[in-house]
Image (tube, coloured by chain):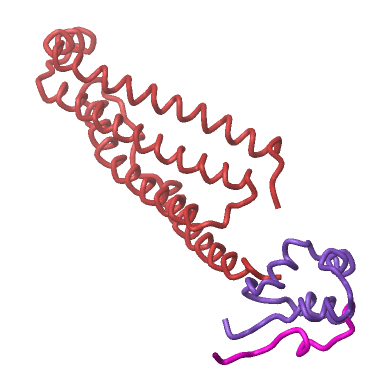
Amino acid sequence: MTASPRDPLLTAARILIVIAMVLAIIVGTLMVVLLPVMIVGQEAILKELAAETGKTLDWQTTAAIQAILILVAIMASIAYHWLRDLRRVIDSVGMGDPFVPENADRLAHMGWLTVAIEALSIPVGGIGQWLAATIKDATSDFGLSLGGILLALVLFILARVFREGAAMRSELEGTV
Amino acid sequence: MPISVKLDELLYQRRMTLTELAEKVDITLANLSILKTGKAKAVRFSTLEAICRELDCQPGDLLGYDAE
């Protein structure tokens, strides 16, 4: 059974994924570009922040911002790979051949990428909270999420489902 | 594989072509060809039933077992 190439659900999913992939590239590139700017203009940024907040800020503040830039760049790269895997799974659905071992591998890969993003969320959340409190007496809600953990679990289970499906399909091949 | 498919012989005896059988049993010519050439890994009961009905034979007439 081949899904129509004009299947509205698949088309909408593809469009959304491409947009999200472009956003991930933009965010990742922005972080990579901002990092050397932060390092070079460290003194000026500290002065400006100090003037804005009225607080004395030291090298720890810029180090924290740089750490967040690096971590967010890594997260954007992980998100890009996650979306690329999802697009390939959707493409295989469009071609009417989703129950293949490659999709099981992709889903398991996506599960590990989700775990990686969740793991990175912890230091990003921690540093973000510290920065928010240091600079503006604010809070940051970035951190580990139950939704992310559930998503990873669902992906690992779906990977198993697809592996079973691929095995069953392979058994059916050659059946007349 | 020690299982042999004797579709060729049965078709010859009934003076029927594979294409004609494919039309009668509603199975694609490609799939029947896979069965005829012994490349099939499994045969559905529904396929056996349809072939036996059209060729007026028993499943044993269609399949053989050769230990060597």
Against A109, is B36 above or below? below
Q: Which residue is drawn at 81% across and 67% down?
A: B18
Left-right relation of A14 to A132: right
Residues A16 and B24: in front is: B24
Q: Which residue is drawn at 22% across and 13% down?
A: A53
Against A108, is B46 above or below? below
Q: Does the magenta segment cover residue B57?
A: yes
- Find residue A74 and report its horizontal and vertical position in percent: 29, 34
Numbered disc total: 0
Left-right relation of B25 to A39: right
Q: Does the magenta segment cover residue A16?
A: no
Against A155, is A24 above or below? above
Q: Which chain is purple?
A: B
Residues A169 and B12: in front is: B12
Q: Quadrant of the C terminus of chain A?
A: bottom right
**Which residue ends up furthest to the bottom in the rendered image?**
B67
Residues A90 and A129: in front is: A90
- Find residue A75 and report its horizontal and vertical position in percent: 33, 35
- Find residue A83 and report its horizontal and vertical position in percent: 46, 38
Q: Which chain is red?
A: A
Q: Residue at x 39, y 50 (%)?
A: A109
Q: The magenta stretch spans which residues?
A: B54-68
- Find residue A65 and report its horizontal and vertical position in percent: 21, 24
Left-right relation of A167 to B51: left
- Displayed quadrant of residue A50: top left
Residues A151 and A138: in front is: A151
Q: Residue at x 30, y 31 (%)?
A: A72
Left-right relation of A138 to A61: right
